[in-house]
């Protein structure tokens, strides 16, 4: 398993918004290229951990595996592509007539 936390809340990399708390992902959640990008990003802490370490909390009690991304069969939605029309309109203000 891989776990990631950001040094800046809401930081986006590889199509995922990362928070300042640890989030766990299955080993096959990211492609090899994505994983290298994440591991080389200075604003992210990335660790490889065993599943047992992920499911154990600080007090030794097991944690719900539903929190582990990639474990529930669901993935995060893909971000909407930024079309040239949307890209061009990002900096414009609406005219008042």
Image (cartoon, grey):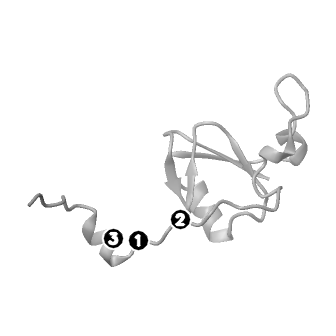
Distance from Cα at disc 3 to Cα at disc 2? 14 Å
Of all residues, the one furthest to the bottom in this rendering is 84
Q: Secondary structure at mark 1?
A: loop
| Residue 72 location (% of width, % of height) | 82, 56
- What residue is disc 3 on? 86
Dots 1, 3 in contact, CB < 8 A: yes
| Residue 35 location (% of width, % of height) | 65, 62
- Comparing 27 with 81, the one in front is 81
Indicate which disc residue 35 carries. none
Distance from Cα at disc 1 to Cα at disc 3? 6 Å
Of all residues, the one furthest to the top in this rendering is 59
- What residue is disc 1 on? 82
23 with respect to 40 (left or right): right
- Comparing 71 with 47, the one in front is 71
33 with respect to 86 (left or right): right
Indicate which disc residue 79 carries. 2
Residue at position x 82%, y 41% in the image: 54
| Residue 84 location (% of width, % of height) | 33, 77
Residue at position x 86%, y 47% in the image: 50
Q: Secondary structure at mark 3?
A: helix
Dots 2, 1 in contact, CB < 8 A: no
Dots 3, 2 in contact, CB < 8 A: no
Q: In terms of sequence position, does the residue under pointer 3 or pointer 2 come before the other?
A: 2
- Comparing 48 with 89, the one in front is 89
């Amino acid at each position: 398993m891989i776990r990631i936390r950001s040094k800046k809340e809401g930081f986006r990399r590889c199509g995922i918004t990362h928070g300042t708390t640890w989030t766990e992902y299955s080993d096959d959640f990211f492609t090899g290229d994505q994983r290298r990008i994440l591991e080389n990003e200075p604003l992210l802490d990335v660790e490889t951990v065993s599943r047992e370490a992920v499911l154990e909390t600080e007090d030794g009690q097991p944690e719900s595996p539903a929190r582990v991304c990639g474990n529930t069969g669901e993935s995060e939605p893909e971000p909407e592509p930024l079309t040239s029309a949307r890209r061009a309109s990002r900096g414009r203000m609406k005219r008042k007539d």
